[in-house]
Image: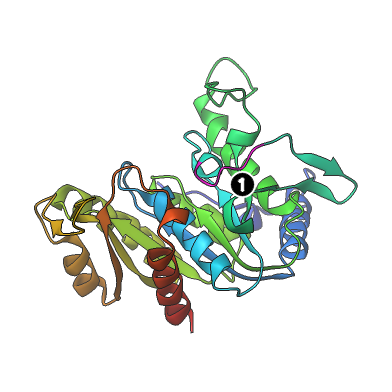
Amino acid sequence: MSFRTYREVPGDDRSGLGRQVAAQRARVAERLRDVGCVVAVLSGKGGVGKTWVSVALACGLAERGHGDIGLLDADLKSPTAARLLEAAGPLRVDETGVHPAVGASGVRVMSTDLLLEEGAPLAWRGPDAERFLVREILETGTLREFLADVAWGSLAVLVVDMPPDGDRIEDLLALVPELGGVLAVTIPSDESRRSVIRALHCARDAGAPLLGLVENMSGYACADCGTVGPLFAGDAGVSLARQFDIPLLCRIPFMPGAHPADVPSLSTRLADAVLGALQ
């Protein structure tokens, strides 16, 4: 089975779809003109601490003083980045666009968590029948609006916390062709390794630069003595780095109750590693 894109359909484009798509991408490019670099953080699997790593990276970059930092929470259905950054609404809207909230370390953040009532699920307006047909279109449209309608201002780095499904990187690349790179997050287990393999293949096949890996929850850090002991069986970080020929940038122990901003040494080490991979 094959499908044609709108560019391959003969005759005049009476719908104006081509012009609409071009205009939308031009809006994104104009909004991101003063953003030095966009970095996507993905995992392919939920529950591995991807958002924690995204927040730690953003805070570390901000603490390093490399310029203003933004974080876009693209996990539209399960947004947690704003809460981790202790950012809250209401959001300010004026003629320049929607202004992001400001959280820990001065990180600018945009998330559906700032738009929804507490505990309310994300719901799309659309036809009751066959709603699943338009859901992905609406999700991609929301990502585009977060990029094009939010007044990010001048940023050194915009970190994009991707949803768990790895194929969403294609949507981001369509909107940000000059993506700085992808940082993948795994935990040591074989189950996580198998999931992140698929996400990394999606990213590589789409043409995204692979910056490296973070192995989260690589051990259990004792709160009293600091000794790190085993938590999960497996060596997913080392195995994935070897398979994709990318660096294992950081191994983060499980630290119960720790906020990314509470461990600045780890956040800045992660930021330095990512900046090194970008060069």
Residue 223, horizontal then vertical, whole percent: 24, 50
Q: Look at the image and tell me whether residue 46 can be seen.
A: yes
Residue 229, horizontal then vertical, whole percent: 12, 56
Residue stretch rendered in magenta on the structure: 84-88
Apparent side of residue 102 relative to residue 186 in the rendered image (left or right): right
- Amino acid type of the residue that numbered disc 1 sits on in the rendered structure: Leu
Q: Quadrant of residue 129?
A: top right
Residue 248, horizontal then vertical, whole percent: 27, 72
Image position of 179 with respect to 230: above or below: below
Foreground of the two, 135 or 181? 181
Disc 1 marks which residue?
Answer: 143
Task: Look at the magenta stretch and give its main secondary structure.
Answer: loop
Apparent side of residue 275 relative to residue 146 in the rendered image (left or right): left
Foreground of the two, 153 or 260? 260
**Residue 85 colored magenta?**
yes
Which residue: 64% across, 35% down?
114
Which residue: 34% across, 42% down?
257
Q: Look at the image and tell me whether residue 208 can be seen.
A: no
> Please, which residue is most extreme toward the bottom here?
279
Foreground of the two, 208 or 80? 80
Foreground of the two, 55 or 35? 55
**Residue 128 colored magenta?**
no
Which residue: 13% across, 50% down?
232
Image position of 53 with respect to 209: above or below: above
